[in-house]
Image (cartoon, rainbow, N blue to C red):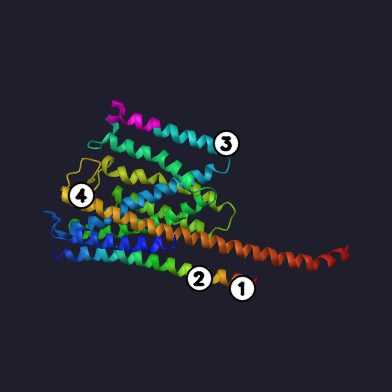
Amino acid sequence: MKRLFPILSVLTAIFLAYTLYLALGKDTPTDAQQGDVYRIIYYHVPSAWTAFLLFFINFIASIQYLASKKPSTQAAAKWVVIVVGVVGVIACFLPPVQKLLPVGMRPSAVATTVLLIPIFYFLIGKFFPGDSLDVLAVTTAEVGVVFCTIVLVTGPIWARPVWGIWWAPGDIRLTSTLVLWLIYVSYLMLRRFSNSAQTQMLAAALAVFGALDVPLVYFSIWFFRTQHPQPVIGGGGSMDPRMLHVLVISWMAFLCFAFLVCWSRFRLELLHREVEAAHAMESLVGAGVAATASLPLNRSSR
Amino acid sequence: MNAIKFLIAAYIATWLIHGVYIGSLVQRFIRLRRELKELAKGK
């Protein structure tokens, strides 16, 4: 296990270097309208998808954590997730529901996304039992915020030469992404500065509400008038296959990188809890010694 | 319009953010390890 991390780190570094070569290489065509600046997409879009995935994992882990506190709630949540998965997938192929989907959005893409809810729910429940769910939640939230920060930084850098402005005030895609970032920053602040015994529960509840912003961010370009470009995949986008190929490879590389960062952050959180437990134990031992020392005095004072 | 500088700026900003975050993780690891060692010594 100790050797696996450095090996994976080297492989990921090579993969990321290859992605950079592809993203800037002459084999990848230049956009006819935007020129080379469009290549920001190879960092901006994979970062956004990675952030969404991490927030989704955070959402599932938070639900699992909230449900795990009571066996009856846990059983009920399990069935709710199964029902959501089955009904959601079937509904996507019903004509009345298909009419509600935005033009160009494939029902199979929506069904796959819905199906991910029960799949992730059971996988996370299996591999992260008990308090490790909370560790996973804080890990994915923090790494997700880092990727979301990159989205919010690279977006305006692309917008300046293409739109002529850094930020389009009032644009629903941009604003909802900023709100998403703020929600998860407040989630991390709550965890950092609150010393209440209920902090983990409160944070999990906040994460569940925060995750509701993810679909709003994703679907905003379909349902609202926005300056943001239309989706490149899953919604009838017309991207050159060579560009799409590089974009998908770039996302794979960023996923590998995010996995390694999450792994490190997960270990850090475990170490942090170990130190906290050691501090608590030390305080208890100290208090025990003090109580023993003061016991005869208490007795004699009666 | 020299748009290439925006492309370079975006790529540099991405790795700068990742670098700063990884640096903070390493710092926190070192601090916690030291703290754990001190606690073990105290026992």
Crowd band around label 1 with a 10 angstrom C-alpha radius: few (<14), some (14–19), many (20+): few
Q: Is residue A29 left or right of residue A217?
A: left
Crowd band around label 3 with a 10 angstrom C-alpha radius: few (<14), some (14–19), many (20+): few
Image position, residue A223 (x, y; %): 28, 40
**Disc 3/disc 2 C-alpha distance (Å):** 41 Å
SS at circle 4:
helix
* Residue with the mark numbered 4: A244
Type of amino acid at the residue the image marks with label 2: Arg
Q: Is residue A222 left or right of residue A67?
A: left
Type of amino acid at the residue the image marks with label 3: Ser
> Residue at the location (55% across, 53% down)?
A199
Tag nearer the camera, 3 or 1: 1
* Residue with the mark numbered 2: B31
Mark identifier at residue B41: 1
- A103 above or below A126? above
Q: Are marks 3 and 2 in contact (CB under 8 Å)?
A: no
Q: Main secondary structure of the magenta part?
A: helix
Please state the chain letter of the residue tagged with numbered disc 4 in the rendered image. Answer: A
> Residue at the location (30% across, 63% down)?
A13
Q: Are marks 3 and 1 in contact (CB under 8 Å)?
A: no
Is disc 4 on the same chain as disc 3?
Answer: yes
**Disc 4/disc 2 C-alpha distance (Å):** 43 Å
Please state the chain letter of the residue tagged with numbered disc 1 in the rendered image. Answer: B
- A265 above or below A243? below
Q: Is residue A39 left or right of residue A251?
A: left
**Disc 4/disc 1 C-alpha distance (Å):** 56 Å
Magenta-drawn segment: A86-98
- State which tag comes first along the sequence, 2 or 1: 2
Type of amino acid at the residue the image marks with label 4: Leu
* Residue with the mark numbered 3: A72
Please state the chain letter of the residue tagged with numbered disc 3 in the rendered image. Answer: A
**Disc 3/disc 1 C-alpha distance (Å):** 44 Å
